[in-house]
Amino acid sequence: MPEGHTIHRLAQDHRERFGDRKVAVSSPQGKFAASAALLDGTPLTTTEAHGKHLFLGFAEHGWVHIHLGLFGKYTFGGAPVPPPTDTVRLRLAVPDAYADLRGPTTCALITDAEKQAIHDRLGPDPLRAADDGEAAWARVSRSRTSIAALLMDQKVIAGVGNVYRAEVLFRHNIDPYRLGRDLTRSEWDAIWSDLVALMREGVRHNRIDTVRPEHTPEAMGRPPRVDDHGGEVYVYRRAQQPCHICGDGIRTADLAARNLFWCPTCQQR
């Protein structure tokens, strides 16, 4: 499932291609056909992201709410705009650009009130300028749940997925099984600030890189990571490989139905 930086990048990509332009809207697959007909030929006035939720605003017509889930995928292209295939749930098109959405968990036209209800159930997002870590800290600091599980709970903090969860805990030498209430305030502030910086870089480069300059392949004289997720990381999907810092083997375990990765030496409880 895409992490929050991907959704914010999608909001940016839509804004750059279609912002304030009258957009041809269609649903070749048919599941969004009625709403597409209502929006067809109207301008895309704003785009927004919160966590893993994308919102495309069409003024008085409301918002297209998109959640990619596990299988959702976007394709962007330019002119000439090709005919869409019948697997496309939502196509937006202008003479020089198009965007095709396939396989999302959610693609629905919603009202302002329905959009607000989604925001209300989500935690603060490190990529939203108006958000900070206070509300998340209030929940984390009194929780008997592990910090690894809390970071994946979208009601606590929105947009963090499995990669950022594993990497930010490693970067701050925090055992993933520590309880939320056992974190110090300074540790939480450092986690939040780091997520803000890392995820902003993720939006900028459209990939996740979490290693510090002194631990890049060039700096360490090691081979670059080869993985379909891309990016240089410390522990994510590196089970049994040596830690870049201490050389111990990276461990993995199941936590809340997701694979957890950590270094037992660098992240001692």
Image: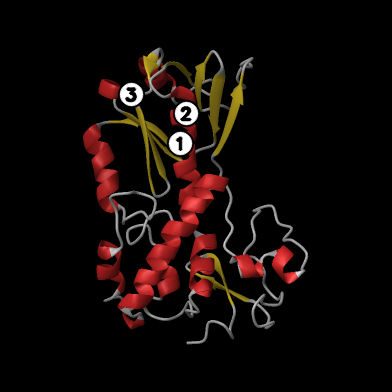
Q: Residues within 10 Å of mark 1 (few under 14, many from 20)?
A: some
Residue 128 spot, x, y in % from top left: 34, 49
Give the residue at x 44% y 36%: 11
Eye-nearest disc, 1 or 3: 1
Residue 12 numbered tag? 1
Percent coordinates x, y for residue 211 in the rendering: 60, 65
* CA separation in Å, label 2 and label 1: 6 Å
The secondary element bearing badge 1 is classed as helix
Residue 225 in percent (x, y) is at 72, 61
Residue 259, by quadrant, is bottom right
- Point out the tag, 2 or 3, that comes first from the N-terminus: 2
Under mark 2, the amino acid is: Glu
Mark number for residue 242?
none
Q: Residues within 10 Å of mark 2 (few under 14, many from 20)?
A: few
Q: CA distance from mark 1 to mark 3?
A: 16 Å
**Residue holding disc 3:** 58
| Mark 2, residue position | 16
Vertical comparison of 200 with 183: above or below: above
Q: What residue is rendered at 53% in x and 64% in y? A: 258
Q: Are marks 1 and 3 in contact (CB under 8 Å)?
A: no
Mark 2 against mark 3, which lies toward the viewer? 2
Lateral position of residue 182 relative to residue 260, left or right: left
Query: Is residue 62 shown left or right of residue 253?
Result: left
